[in-house]
Amino acid sequence: MDHGSIEREIRIDAAPEVVFDVVSNPEHVEQWWPDGARYDPTPGSTGEIVFTTPSGERAPTGFEVVDAIPPRRFAFRWTQPPGEPARADNSFLVIFELTPAGDGTLLRMTETGFRERGWDDAKVAAEHADHVSGWDHFLPRLTAYLGRLGARR
C-alpha cells in the first residue's frame, strides 16, 4: 500500500461559498475538526489548532495557511515541530478543493507529506493509518455541521 497521500471526495448540499467558509474560518473549523483553532484564514498566517487527548490534555499543533482562494481552494500545513516554520519536510499539507456540483459542492480533500518527513516505513504507515482514521471520523462531522447550519445557496 502506498502511504504517500490520503484522498477523500464528498458531495455536500451547500454552495461552494458556504463550504469554503466552513473549511477555512477557524470559528467553523473548530465545530467539526479540532477542539480549538486560532489562525487568520489568509495565506502566510500561522497559528495553531488544538485537540483534546483522551486523558483530557490539550494538545496544540502548529498550523500555517498556504493558500486561500475563495470559494475554490483552501490549503494549510500542520504538525510542524513547535517553533519551526512549516515546510515540506516537517509538516503535512492538506488541500480542500471545492467544485460546484449541481446545487451543492464536490469537496476533494488531499493530505500529503507522509514520506517527505524522513520517517522509516513503519512510522510512515502508522502516521498514515492514524490520519486515515482521523479524516474518516472528521469529514462526516463536516457534512453534519453544514447540515445543522441549514447551509444552502
Image (spheres, grey):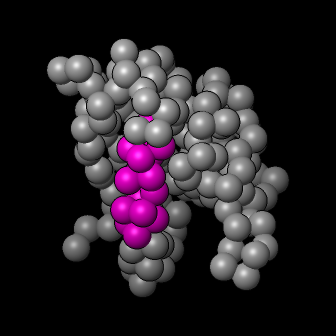
Report the quarter where the N terminus lies.
bottom left
Left or right, residue 49 beside residue 129: right
User: Residue 116: image x %, image y %?
Assistant: 47, 59
Is 90 placed above or below 73 here? Answer: below
User: Residue 68: image x %, image y %?
Assistant: 53, 24
Of 142 and 48, nearer the camera is: 142
Residue at the far left in the pictured view: 102
Left or right, residue 34 beside residue 139: right
Asked if one can make out residue 55 in the rendered structure from this viewpoint, the answer is yes
Residue appearing at x 42%, y 84% in the figure: 122
Please identify the dominant SS of the magenta region: helix
Residue 38: quarter of image: top right
Residue appearing at x 45%, y 73% in the figure: 130
Of 37 and 127, nearer the camera is: 37
Of 21 and 64, nearer the camera is: 21
Whether 137 is among the magenta residues is yes
Asked if one can make out residue 95 in the rendered structure from this viewpoint, the answer is no
Residue appearing at x 25%, y 38% in the figure: 11
User: Residue 118: image x %, image y %?
Assistant: 51, 68
Left or right, residue 136 beside residue 36: left
Whether 80 is among the magenta residues is no
Report the quarter where the C terminus lies.
top left
Magenta residues? 132-146
Residue appearing at x 62%, y 54% in the figure: 34
Residue at the far right in the pictured view: 83
